[in-house]
């Protein structure tokens, strides 16, 4: 923490935390005597006028809120000093004071200055709290222009919490997350807290994101992976290039292609080493998870450790090397923790699933019209999804510019039927 931060956050635990909750009492070295019904200093009559001896409040919270607002306008922060409980659990009086009221005991920078400004209130017979002693005099400068930076006047409001959590779950990094809420609210001065408070809230909220049923939803998706592999195991991509998280654990993914020509996740592994034995273990466990059905072909990165592992574990699988696009590029960064990976993993899967549903609707909800008179085109429409048919149609159109003819007698080979395909185009004049 820098020296500037220490000026703002020292003893922050003593008054209000970054969530805006009132924490614990600040017990100073000297003890208050019984309230004496006096007030000291001059009470201003302007907008920032504070409490006056004899004022009554329905409860302590109302008194504290009134004094806190006065402190914000004047340029200081307040804390609860102490309270006295006589003959039970009900307090008989309470003291709220300037947050610089501590007696300085250390030689380095601190905001403790033994300030005497305070309000003492007593509980009267009617159940109301009455200001009994008010001290206005401060022995330090008041800073109304920067009071919003003081710990007692900072809090992360509920609407801001919701925005920060939503942006975090969508995969936005903390720095961009904070910048976004600043723009939405017209600048950092309108946040009600500092960017550091926002960052602390984001980091703390990540520890509580897992909800009941999240683990079960992942298990359910693993079963969907197994079912999908039974249909699309002919060609698999194994990718290890795109993620090395803060624990230096590469994430390896098994990705296939469905009948909509979309990437589908068929497995993943977090690896602590990238040697031959590690890849052998990953391949064996993955094959066991999907029923020991070997893929027809697998495409991997150009890694010297992967090739011998595939040769031993999947000897009948065709292996090719090629760079691939990462499945989770939009969701995971190098700073991702394991827990963040699980959360963003589910988000990525939901996004891919939604895309698949859209493709299914485009395929089933619209009637495709044949472009030719060929019967086999009608058959292709019935067999292919719309996405695959659109790809097939580009090849079909090329047939319109071809002419098929029989070869001469000297080219005929017994048992083999040959044809000559040549370009054919009709140019209208």
Image (cartoon, rainbow, N blue to C red):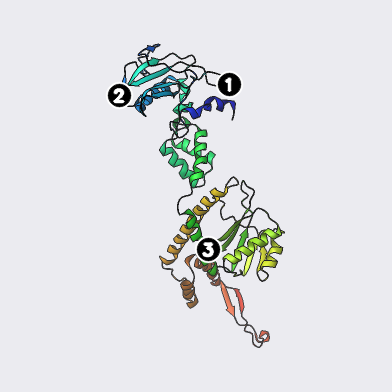
| Residue in the image at 55% along x and 64% along y | 257
Single out the residue that lies furthest toward the left: 126
| Closer to us: 260 or 194 | 194
- Find residue 139 and report its horizontal and vertical position in percent: 48, 14
- Residues at badges 3 and 1 in contact (C-beta under 8 Å)? no
| Closer to us: 182 or 150 | 150
Cα gap from disc 3 to disc 2, whole angstroms: 65 Å
| Residue in the image at 60% along x and 19% along y | 107
- Find residue 48 and report its horizontal and vertical position in percent: 38, 19
Say what secondary structure mark 2 lies in.
loop
Q: Is residue 253 visible in the rendered structure shown here? A: yes
The residue identified by callout 1 is 109
Cα gap from disc 3 to disc 1, whole angstroms: 59 Å
The residue identified by callout 2 is 128
Say what secondary structure mark 3 lies in.
helix
| Closer to us: 133 or 303 | 133
The residue identified by callout 3 is 225
């Amino acid at each position: 923490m820098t020296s500037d931060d220490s000026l703002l956050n020292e003893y922050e635990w003593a008054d209000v935390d970054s969530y805006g909750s009132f924490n614990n009492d600040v017990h100073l070295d000297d003890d208050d005597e019984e309230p004496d019904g006096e007030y000291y200093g001059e009470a201003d009559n302007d907008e920032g006028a504070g409490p006056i001896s004899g004022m009554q409040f329905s409860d302590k919270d109302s008194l504290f809120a009134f004094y806190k607002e006065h402190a914000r306008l004047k340029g200081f922060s307040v804390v609860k000093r102490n309270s006295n409980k006589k003959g039970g659990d009900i307090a008989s009086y309470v003291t709220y004071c300037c947050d610089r009221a501590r007696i300085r005991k250390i030689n380095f920078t601190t905001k403790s200055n033994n300030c005497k400004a305070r309000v003492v209130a007593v509980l009267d017979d009617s159940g109301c709290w009455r200001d009994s002693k008010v001290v206005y005099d401060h022995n330090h400068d008041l800073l109304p222009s920067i009071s919003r930076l003081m710990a007692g006047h900072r809090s992360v409001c509920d609407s801001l919490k919701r925005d920060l959590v939503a942006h975090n779950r969508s995969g936005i990094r903390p720095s961009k997350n904070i910048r976004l809420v600043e723009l939405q609210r017209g600048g950092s001065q309108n946040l009600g807290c500092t960017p550091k408070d926002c960052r602390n809230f984001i980091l703390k909220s990540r520890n509580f994101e897992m909800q009941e049923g999240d683990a079960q939803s992942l298990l359910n998706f693993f079963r969907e992976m197994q079912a999908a592999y039974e249909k699309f195991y002919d060609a698999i991509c194994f990718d290890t290039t795109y993620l090395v998280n803060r624990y230096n654990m590469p994430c390896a993914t098994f990705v296939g292609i469905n009948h909509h020509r979309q990437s589908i996740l068929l497995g993943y592994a977090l690896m602590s080493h990238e040697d031959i034995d590690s890849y052998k273990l990953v391949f064996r466990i993955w094959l066991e998870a999907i029923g020991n059905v070997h893929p027809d072909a697998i495409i991997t990165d150009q890694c010297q450790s992967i090739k011998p592992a595939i040769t031993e574990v999947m000897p009948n699988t065709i292996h090719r090397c090629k760079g691939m696009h990462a499945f989770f590029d939009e969701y995971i960064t190098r700073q991702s923790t394991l827990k963040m990976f699980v959360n963003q993993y589910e988000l990525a899967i939901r996004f891919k699933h939604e895309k698949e549903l859209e493709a299914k609707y485009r395929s089933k909800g619209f009637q495709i019209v044949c472009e030719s008179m060929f019967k086999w085109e009608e058959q292709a429409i019935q067999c292919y999804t719309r996405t695959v048919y659109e790809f097939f149609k580009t090849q079909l159109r090329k047939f319109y510019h071809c002419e098929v003819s029989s070869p001469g007698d000297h080219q005929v080979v017994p048992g083999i039927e040959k044809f000559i395909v040549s370009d054919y185009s009709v140019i209208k004049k």
